Amino acid sequence: MKRIFLALLVLGTTVASCSKNSGGGVKLKNDTDSIAYIIGMNVGMNLMRMDSTLRVDVLCEGIRDVFRAGTKLSPADAETYYLRYVTYTLPEKARAYEEQFLADIAKSNRAYARTSSGVTYTVGDVGDQERIPTADRDTVAIRYVIRTADGRELYSSYERGDTLRCPVGDLRKGVRESLKLIGKGGRIEAWLPAATAYGAEGDAELGIAPNATLYYEMELIDVVKYTNRRR
């Protein structure tokens, strides 16, 4: 976290001035101006990804104050405040938004139910009720699709021609809970809270952001009970 904060300070101090309405009045007179503008674009795009609700005028005032050598907070105080915000305040806001989002889904569509952990699901096909994975040592074969809350597809085992085979206990918590609700041949669609999916870390390789609520479509192809394997 400290490195992130320091990097933002370094990037911020490269921009001499900015304003929400100043873009049309700035002329790029030479290479130095163009590079400064490009760096400013980079800073803006990174900050948009972090938090698109940041007030541009306040952000720019912080940059100007660095150049004026008269900031309202010392670097040490600013770092402490920032780390507290990204470590505690921001995740709490994300959880509150997520909870309301999932509650609204369940409220607006009676086909959806919720587990105690917040997994919000609807069963398309219950499957074979004699072949339900009930234990973490049971082995399952599944096909699935993962999407973001805005519908962007992150992964599809159908497109890749893959079937995942593994013990139930090796799966993400929300996936485990979902599969235990259906039997072999069953299908389920589930919204997974971040805490039951990829958590605060996310997954850069899959393009999953930290604290992301994910939508899964899962098909339970096969179930091998652990008790049967031992016989």
Image (cartoon, rainbow, N blue to C red):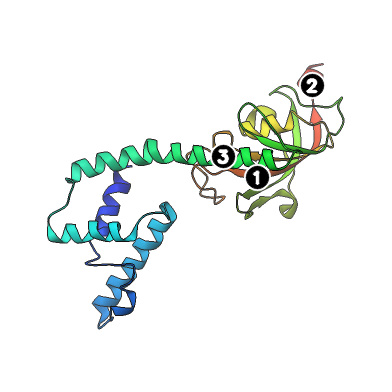
Of all residues, the one furthest to the front in this rendering is 108
| Residue 11 in view of the camera | no
Whole-angstrom CA distance, mark 2 to mark 3, is 43 Å
Amino acid, disc 2? Arg
Report the label total. Answer: 3
Residue at x 56%, y 37% (from the top left corner): 99
Residue at mark 1? 215
Q: Residues within 10 Å of mark 1 (few under 14, many from 20)?
A: many
Q: Is residue 125 left or right of residue 198?
A: right
Which image quarter is the C terminus in?
top right
Q: Residue at x 48, y 39 (%)?
A: 200
Tell me the SS state at disc 2: helix
- Secondary structure of residue under mark 3: helix
Residue 123 at least partly seen: yes
Q: Residues within 10 Å of mark 3 (few under 14, many from 20)?
A: few
What residue sits right under mark 3 in the picture?
100
**Disc 1/disc 3 C-alpha distance (Å):** 16 Å
Spatial CA distance of label 2 from label 1 is 32 Å
Q: Residue at x 60, y 53 (%)?
A: 150
Q: Of discs 2 and 3, which sits in the foreground? A: 3
Place of residue 51 in the rendered image (x, y in percent of width and height, measured from the top left): 41, 52
Q: At which x and y percent is residue 169?
A: 65, 27
| Location of the N terminus (image quadrant) | top left
Identify the mark at residue 229; answer none if there is no mark: 2
Q: Residue at x 86, y 27 (%)?
A: 129
Tag 2 near tag 3, CB within 8 Å: no
> What amino acid is labelled 3 in the image?
Gln
Q: Earlier in the sequence, mark 2 or mark 3?
A: 3
